[in-house]
């Protein structure tokens, strides 16, 4: 199994450009989420989904959109990139029924906005 | 709201014990977690503890939980250079699994030979 796959691994954007970070998991997990990691701030939740067709906002949702049309995919869209969105983005997934709530992470997408 | 706090940096000598501390705010969290992030990689679950436990031991790792003070610690015995990484404490807010975890800032562990 591939687990959680994120693409691209690296991206450079100019201010105002839009792009989509892709996330796919092959573990049939119901829950999927997007976090951003910034130095000294840990991981902050952007958006999450508890199943296909259901999404909700996390701690820092502004400037990002998500959709969940299938169980496997959970893309993150940056509508109009800003330098403040320079970060490392992690997609994660988990089972809904596991009692531990363990998250499985992708390897990250490093985004630089100039 | 929910909050998780950790110190940012710890440096130890190879062979010593490392203790990484964490405080959290949600007393209803059912599970608390320690994740490890190696350079250029995603996070991997290192260990977790159920909220009705005080201690959990797993080989070189010991997790201590003080629910009264909302304090969690991770002790790594006989620390090796391969243990150098960022360690994140996390809680699952609320009493049920929601797929959301709240993470601390991460503690960078530096192990000197």
Image: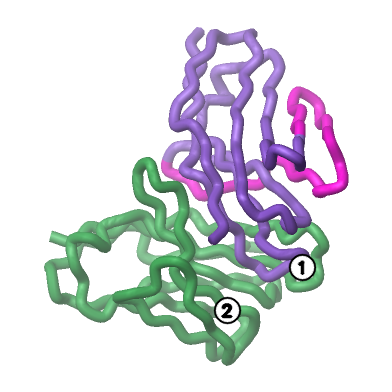
Q: Which mark is residue A49?
A: 2
Q: Secondary structure at mark 1?
A: loop
Residue A52 image point, x, y percent? 61, 88
Q: Quadrant of residue A84?
A: bottom left
Q: Please name the residue shown 38% across and 81% down the image.
A: A65
In the depicted structure, whether residue A110 falls above or below residue A68: above
**Label at residue B96:** 1
Q: Which residues are magenta?
A: B40-64
Q: How many residues crowd mark 2 within 10 Å: few (<14), some (14–19), many (20+)?
A: many
Residue A41 covered by magenta stretch? no
Q: Residue A89: x percent and y percent?
A: 40, 60
Q: Nearer the viewer, residue A61 or B78?
A: A61
Disc 1 crowd, CA 10 A, few/some/many (<14, 14-19, 20+): some
Residue drawn 45% across and 58% down? Answer: A44
Towards the viewer: A24 or A102: A102
Mark 2 residue element? strand
Q: Is residue A53 above or below residue A26?
A: below
Which quadrant of the rendered structure holds the N terminus of chain A? bottom right
Q: Which quadrant is home to the C terminus of chain A?
A: bottom left
Q: Colour of chain A?
A: green
């Amino acid at each position: 199994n591939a687990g959680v796959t994120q693409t691209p691994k690296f991206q450079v954007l100019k201010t105002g450009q839009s792009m989509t970070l892709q996330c796919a998991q092959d573990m049939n997990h119901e829950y999927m989420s997007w976090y951003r990691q910034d130095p000294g701030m840990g991981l902050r939740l952007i958006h999450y989904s508890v199943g296909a067709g259901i999404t909700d906002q996390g701690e820092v949702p502004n400037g990002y959109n998500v959709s969940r049309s299938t169980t496997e995919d959970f893309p993150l869209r940056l509508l109009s990139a800003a330098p403040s969105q320079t970060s490392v983005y992690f997609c994660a997934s988990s089972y809904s029924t596991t009692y531990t709530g363990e998250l499985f992470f992708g390897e990250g997408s490093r985004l630089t906005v100039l | 709201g929910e909050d998780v706090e950790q110190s940012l940096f710890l440096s130890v000598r190879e062979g010593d014990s490392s203790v990484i501390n964490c405080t959290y705010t949600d007393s209803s969290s059912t599970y608390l977690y320690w994740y490890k992030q190696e350079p250029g990689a995603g996070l991997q679950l290192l260990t977790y503890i159920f909220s009705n436990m005080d201690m959990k031991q797993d080989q070189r790792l010991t997790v201590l939980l003080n629910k009264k003070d909302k304090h969690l610690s991770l002790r790594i015995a006989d620390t090796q250079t391969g243990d150098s990484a960022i360690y994140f404490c996390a809680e699952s807010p609320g009493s049920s699994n929601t797929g959301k975890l709240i993470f601390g800032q991460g503690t960078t562990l530096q192990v000197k030979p």
